[in-house]
């Protein structure tokens, strides 16, 4: 089971934001879309960074509400861990668990092609487990 299958099921749309936008704008976007992260990309589709809810919480804790006027580029994570479409679901889960984040951009040939969340990965693992259990029940009752 690969990340490609998750993207094919959920879609490849990624919520993006310009690194020059204010953090306040990013917060509104996160709230309106009910998502946990925004990605910043270059004109060529290359991944520049990711801004998560946790980044915003840390910023406000350190500098107060006035920090919402900061630009996204000044606080986004630039050294982003990524997956490829052929990354397995287990590998994606390991990357997110080990690094303690919930969103994993998917990059192919240097371009952003999607994003998966820990929720996407867990949902897929549950579906696979349920399918395996059903297959086992069918095998047992057929034999």
Image: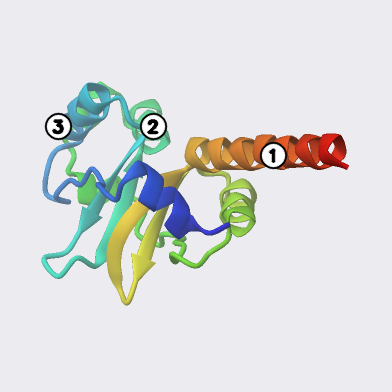
Would you call the spot at circle 3 few (<14 residues within 10 Å), some (14-19), or many (20 or more)?
A: some
Quadrant where the image shows the N terminus? bottom right
Q: Residue 91: image x %, image y %?
A: 61, 59
* Percent coordinates x, y for residue 124 in the rendering: 55, 41
Does the CB distance between marks 2 and 1 fall below 8 Å?
Answer: no
Q: Earlier in the sequence, mark 2 or mark 1?
A: 2
Residue 121 in the image: state x and y as whole percent.
54, 43
Q: Which residue is mark 2?
A: 62
Q: Quadrant of residue 60?
A: top left
Identify whether 10 is placed above or below 34: below
Sequence order check, earlier mark of 2 and 3: 3
Q: Contact (CB < 8 A) between labels 3 and 1?
A: no
* Helix, strand or loop for disc 3: helix
- Quarter of the C terminus within the rendering: top right
Q: Secondary structure beneath disc 2?
A: helix
Q: Which mark is residue 25?
A: 3
Q: Please, is residue 50 above or below residue 67 in the view? A: below
Measure the C-alpha gap from mark 3 to mark 1: 40 Å
| Residue located beneath label 1 in the image | 129
Residue shown at the point (14%, 38%) measured from the top left: 22
Residue nearest the viewer, comparing 61 with 43: 43
Q: How far apart, in angstroms, are the residues tagged by discs 2 and 1?
A: 42 Å
| Residue 123 on image: x %, y % | 55, 35
């Amino acid at each position: 089971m690969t990340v490609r299958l998750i993207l094919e099921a959920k879609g490849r749309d990624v919520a993006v934001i310009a690194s020059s936008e204010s953090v306040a704008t990013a917060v509104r976007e996160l709230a309106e879309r009910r998502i946990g992260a925004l990605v910043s990309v270059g004109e060529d589709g290359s991944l520049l960074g990711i801004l998560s809810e946790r980044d915003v919480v840390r910023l406000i804790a350190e500098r107060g509400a006035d920090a919402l006027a900061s630009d996204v580029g000044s606080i986004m994570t630039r050294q982003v861990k990524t997956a490829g479409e052929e990354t397995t679901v287990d590998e994606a889960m390991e990357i997110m668990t080990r690094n303690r984040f919930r969103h994993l951009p998917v990059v192919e040939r240097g371009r952003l092609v999607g994003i998966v969340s820990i929720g996407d990965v867990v949902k897929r693992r549950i579906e696979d487990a349920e399918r395996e259990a059903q297959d086992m029940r069918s095998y047992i009752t057929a034999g």
